[in-house]
Image (cartoon, rainbow, N blue to C red):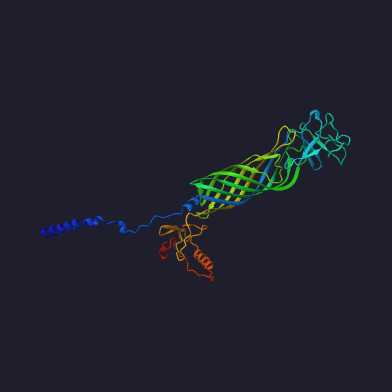
Amino acid sequence: MKRSVLKYFGAFVIGYLWALPAFAQFNLSDVYATRPAIKYSPVRRVLNMFSFDAGVGTGQSFYNQDLSGFDLYYRGDDLLIGIPQENGSMDTVAYRNWLTRPEAVSITGGGGNGGDFPDIPNPIPPGGGVDDGILDSANTVSHYSNQDFPELGYRGRARVIPIHMSIFFNYKKFRVGFGFEAEHHKFDYLNPYNSYNGLIGSYVDDFSTWNFKYNLLVGYEFFQFMGWSYVAELGIGKYSLGSAYDKNVQKPTVDIQLALPMYFHVSEYFRVFIRPSYEIRGYSTTIPGATSAIKTNQNSLKVTFGLSFTIPEIRRCPIRNCETQQKHQHGDREFRGQPIFYPQNPQIGQIPQTYQKLRWKRKNLKKGKGGKATPKPAGNSAGGDNSKGTSE
């Protein structure tokens, strides 16, 4: 018994040593299939790092204008500002429409010597106040010096409709980009800081125009929750006034924008967003002869609604009879199973039954076959079987 065991064991050892060179050439890759390395288009990989936003919204622009240091002339709806003169005398020239296009108006008077405001006593009688220059009901003119009302200024609102477009380069949670915005601006009137019991009237100018902004934008995604991502964004750029303003005498300030875009991720490549923002901006108006320009704050609060998308880094699967719904591989290439508007790796119960039908219909129409295709359901499996497809 012991001899037979030793005999068989010795035969096994001799056979193993004889076959060892053959076993040394054995590789598990000959037994287990391996996938080839996936090749990606370098152009698509670069484009996939960019995102594009576009939307339209609503908001208000808040005007605030300090006129301390200027005189005010008021007759009915005609409102003008003037430059204070020595001896309390009246200005020879005042300006209307100073908010948008300052227009010089001659107020030289005194005994009917002409001007748009004739027969105004000049100089102002000593001790004159709010009734300076009152002649009759047809030519009632009030002159308010900068000493009469030190709190002279106007504030008000204008309705705005922004059309927003931006492009971003994304790296992890950071992004930097360029934004453009066309803003429809509708103005009505401004109210004085202090009407002094109704003595000072409102500034009325019914106009609308298009203003434009160009911003450098930087942002950081600081929070994600239930398919939403929240971004803190800062923009700095140029603010351009529209055609309603006189650009020769009015110079815009730098536009500073603080925004909190909130994105809902419909899919990996497609999002909808809500973008509340607050902008700090304004412009200065140069009045000839004045020691300083009129500074007008025009800060804005807006909310924009829009769409955002990213160019996919891989193509949609071109194989007609492939029913794989998730991202999958054919040969050395990876493909998408869904349009960019739907989840790219859907789970059970997330697969619409119309995807394949719509894709087949488009291909049939493109080939000129026409007719109505009736595909079989895509099934309940999220991954599907890609064995029906062929490798590229």
Residue 172 in the figure: left or right of residue 211: left
Point out residue 205 in the picture as x, y percentages from the top left corner. Answer: 75, 45
Q: Residue at x 40, y 64 (%)?
A: 387
Q: Residue at x 79, y 36 (%)?
A: 93
Point out residue 7 in the picture as x, y percentages from the top left corner. Answer: 13, 59
Image quadrant containing the C terminus: bottom left
Residue 27 in view, yes or no:
yes
Residue 190 in which image quadrant: top right
Q: Nearer the viewer, residue 19 or 381?
A: 19
Residue 129 in the figure: left or right of residue 2: right
Q: From the viewer's perspective, is residue 368 above or below residue 59?
A: below
Q: How many marks?
A: 0
Point out residue 209 in the picture as x, y percentages from the top left corner. Answer: 70, 48
Q: From the viewer's perspective, is residue 205 above or below residue 129?
A: below
Q: Residue at x 13, y 59 (%)?
A: 5
Residue 219 in which image quadrant: top right
Q: From the viewer's perspective, is residue 12 above or below residue 297?
A: below
Q: Nearer the viewer, residue 151 or 361?
A: 361
Point out residue 108 in the picture as x, y percentages from the top left corner. Answer: 83, 35
Residue 296 in view, yes or no:
no
Q: Nearer the viewer, residue 73 or 25?
A: 25
Q: Nearer the viewer, residue 373 or 101?
A: 101
Residue 145 in the figure: left or right of residue 241: right
Image quadrant containing the N terminus: bottom left
Q: Residue furthest bottom?
A: 371
